[in-house]
Each structure stands twice: as structure tokens, then as C-alpha cells.
Image (cartoon, rainbow, N blue to C red):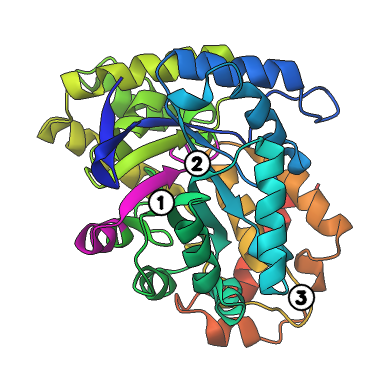
């Protein structure tokens, strides 16, 4: 399988990384421990050398399962990454306590990569006040962490601020066919390259939607191509074309997914994307864009809504109906918003959100349209 230099010339990681947030679960959503252990080891045996977990994955059980899977000589075969849940920290001591707990769960003395999890502006400002840089520097100095980074969920200006705040080894961003200009996006990859910060990509299949919810009209350009690639392979190849991307995480939940992804990643370097391939990809992207009903980027500048209406979440569900022919799942998601009393019906049309929207969207009208489609 293709590997890429990560952080320095002596460290390499498989381009395909295992994200441990979608491991096997039973009918009640509970992690099936032995199946998860077998899955992790199968991935490693198949050539995956980057394992990504976090404090909160699977209700806090993911790190424990990863630790068990890495026994019997498997630890020496991989790079291990986990993340600090900053939202659970109120003091610098909390950060230390949580990290110590993570090492206990993983049954390790150190981790290779430690990331600040899911940063957005408010959380970032909070962590700065808690002296997060001093905390990270201490972990590095003591050898309990080899490299540091952050995962990101906000707009590009915030990404730029964080990236330039210290020397980072890696940053983790969402990037895929549909999210080329979303959050950090392509601009973030270019800035990371300039700053010599390696990029880890999450959601290359947009939560699986680019693999399992492909509308018929989207499949047509793929089918007309001279390549015999599945939508999954097209999606992975789109991300892999960026040389600054060193690891592409996939939340694989069974061995068949591992085997298929490994097959794809083994063939990547043999047939790089051609200009004709990129033209096919651009055609698919345009077809997806034509399906979007509300061009919301989920920047959340419209929030907080005085009535607690979940504006970006509603628009995401609304768009998914058309992007992925996924009415049933979107309606199920909207039912949960109704239960939480944060659906469109709580909107009083005050217009505050529209004054703050950088896209100048007609939010009130869009919410009404979304409600008419999503409400059962």
C-alpha cells in the first residue's frame, strides 16, 4: 500500500488510516469489543499503519479497544493518534488528567500524535486561556507525545489563526468531493503546505454518503469514464491527488470495507488521475452543486439563534434530501430536532440570523421550505 512521509523523512504512514469512530456495534449501538479488536488487527495486517481514535469515540470505549488491539506486538507496527476533548476542560489540570486517563485506556506510556479535537473559534479561545500551548510543550518535552496537531471544524480565517499560532506537526481537516471549499478546504491545504504542516483528511466519503447514497444522475459521468472505478474509488483518488495529504482516514466498520479500501489504495500510485479524470470529477461536482437547495456553509455565524433554531443542521438535512436522494434519513434527523424543540417552527422571523449571514442567504424563507419537505 502507498505510504507517505509524515512529519520528517524518517517517518512514514500508510496513506490509508483507520478511524476508530465507526467500529462494529450491536443492535443497541454498543461497541462489539472482540469484533473491533479483530477489525483493527486485520487492518494492520493488511498494511494500515496509522490508527486514529479519540476520548469520546464509542462513548469512551474506542481508546480502550484500541489499546487491547495493539497488544501482542501490534503496537510496534503502527502510529497511534488520539485527541484532547477541550470542551471537557475547565483548567490546565483537566487537560493533564484527561491525557493521563487516555494513556491508561490505551495502556501506553506515550502516543505518537496528540491532537486538539474538533477546534472552532470559541473552543480555541477557551483553550488558549487554559495555556494549551504550555500543556502541549510539556507533553513533548516529557516524551509522552511525539507530535502535536489539531482537528478542525470552522471557517478558514480561524484555521489560519490556529495554524500560525505555533509549530504544529499535523492538522486534520474535512475534505472530499463535496467539501473542496468547506471549512479549511483547499485553501487550508495550500496554507498547510506553505507552513510545512502535514495534512490528515477526515470524512473523505462524507460520512459514507459518497459511497452509499449516490443518485443515478451522479453515477452517469462515472459510468461514461474510461476508468472502471467505483464512486468510492473516485472519492479516495480525489483526496489522494493532494501531495500535502499524508493520511486519509476511513471509519471502516467491517473487514470487507478494509479489504476493498486496501485494494483501492494499493492501486493509487499505478494510475494517477489524468486531465480527463479531473474533467470527469469536475462534472460530478457541478452536478452535486446543482442539487444544493440552500448554499449554507455551516459557518454558524447565524448562531446562536434567540429561539435556538438549529439553522445549519436544518439546511444540511434539507440539502441531503436532494444531494443523496435521502428523504427518509433526513426526515428522521428532522424529527429529532422537533423533539429537541429546535426545528423551524420555533422561528419568529426576527431576521437576526440574516443580518449575520456572510452568504446573505434568505434564511427565514429557506427554513420554511426545508420544513415543508422534512416534516413528516
Structural crowding at the residue carrying mark 1, measured as other residues with C-alpha within 10 Å and reported as few (<14), some (14–19) or many (≥20): some
Q: In the image shown, does 47 or 352 lie closer to the viewer?
A: 47
Q: Which residue is mark 1?
A: 179
Left/right placement of residue 176 relative to residue 269 reads right
Q: Is residue 191 magenta?
A: yes
Tell me if I can see residue 365 in this picture. Answer: yes
Disc 1 is placed on an element classified as: loop
Dot 3 lies on which element? loop
- Residue 23 shows in the view: no
Vertical relation: 331 (above or below) 23: below
Q: Which mark is residue 253?
A: none
Question: Are the residues flagged by discs 2 and 1 in contact, CB closer than 8 Å?
Answer: yes
Q: Characterize the local packing of mark 3: few (<14), some (14-19) or many (20 or more) Cα atoms within 10 angstroms.
A: some
| Relative to 218, 39 lies left or right | right
Q: Are marks 1 and 3 in contact (CB under 8 Å)?
A: no
Assign a secondary structure to mark 2: loop
111 or 244: nearer the viewer: 111
Whichever of callouts 1 and 3 sits on the residue coming sooner in the sequence is: 1
Residue 309: image location, x then y, percent? 74, 70
Residue at 60% across, 34% down = 20
Instruction: Residue 344: give x, y in percent of width and height.
Output: 75, 66
Find out whether residue 121 is within the magenta segment: no
Q: To which residue does mark 3 refer?
A: 347
Name the residue beneath numbered marker 2.
206
**Magenta span covers which residues?**
189-207
Compare marks 2 and 3 and give the one earlier in the sequence.
Answer: 2
Amino acid at each position: 500500500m502507498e505510504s507517505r512521509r509524515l512529519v520528517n523523512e524518517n517517518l512514514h504512514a500508510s496513506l490509508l488510516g483507520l478511524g476508530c469512530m465507526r467500529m462494529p456495534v450491536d443492535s443497541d449501538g454498543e461497541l462489539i469489543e472482540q469484533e473491533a479488536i479483530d477489525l483493527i488487527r486485520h487492518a494492520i495486517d493488511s498494511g494500515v499503519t496509522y490508527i486514529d481514535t479519540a476520548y469520546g469515540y464509542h462513548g469512551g470505549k474506542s481508546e480502550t479497544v484500541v489499546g487491547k488491539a495493539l497488544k501482542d506486538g501490534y503496537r510496534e507496527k503502527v502510529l497511534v493518534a488520539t485527541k484532547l476533548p477541550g470542551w471537557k476542560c475547565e483548567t490546565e489540570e483537566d487537560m493533564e488528567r484527561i491525557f493521563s486517563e487516555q494513556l491508561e485506556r490505551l495502556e501506553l506510556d506515550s502516543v505518537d500524535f496528540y491532537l486538539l479535537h474538533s477546534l472552532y473559534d470559541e473552543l480555541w479561545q477557551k483553550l488558549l486561556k487554559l495555556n494549551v500551548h504550555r500543556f502541549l510543550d510539556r507533553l513533548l518535552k516529557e516524551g509522552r507525545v511525539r507530535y502535536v496537531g489539531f482537528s478542525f471544524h470552522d471557517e478558514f480565517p480561524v484555521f489560519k489563526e490556529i495554524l500560525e499560532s505555533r509549530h504544529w506537526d499535523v492538522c486534520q481537516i474535512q475534505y472530499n468531493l463535496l467539501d473542496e471549499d468547506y471549512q479549511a478546504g483547499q485553501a487550508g491545504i495550500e496554507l498547510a503546505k506553505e507552513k510545512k504542516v502535514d495534512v490528515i483528511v477526515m470524512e473523505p466519503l462524507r460520512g459514507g454518503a459518497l459511497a452509499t447514497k449516490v443518485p443515478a444522475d451522479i453515477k452517469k459521468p462515472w459510468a461514461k469514464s474510461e476508468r472502471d472505478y467505483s464512486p468510492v474509488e473516485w472519492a479516495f483518488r480525489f483526496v489522494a491527488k493532494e501531495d500535502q495529504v499524508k493520511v486519509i482516514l476511513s471509519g471502516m466498520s467491517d473487514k470487507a470495507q478494509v479489504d476493498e479500501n486496501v485494494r483501492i489504495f494499493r492501486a493509487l500510485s499505478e494510475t494517477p488521475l489524468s486531465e480527463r479524470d479531473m474533467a470527469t470529477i469536475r462534472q460530478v461536482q457541478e452536478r452535486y452543486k446543482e442539487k444544493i437547495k440552500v448554499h449554507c456553509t455551516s459557518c454558524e455565524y447565524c448562531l446562536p439563534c434567540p429561539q435556538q433554531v438549529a439553522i445549519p443542521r436544518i439546511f444540511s438535512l434539507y440539502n441531503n434530501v436532494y444531494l443523496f436522494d435521502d428523504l427518509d434519513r433526513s426526515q428522521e434527523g428532522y424529527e429529532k430536532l422537533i423533539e429537541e424543540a429546535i426545528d423551524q417552527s420555533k422561528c419568529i422571523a426576527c431576521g437576526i440570523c440574516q443580518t449575520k449571514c456572510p452568504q446573505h442567504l434568505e434564511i427565514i424563507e429557506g427554513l420554511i421550505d426545508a420544513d415543508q419537505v422534512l416534516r413528516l
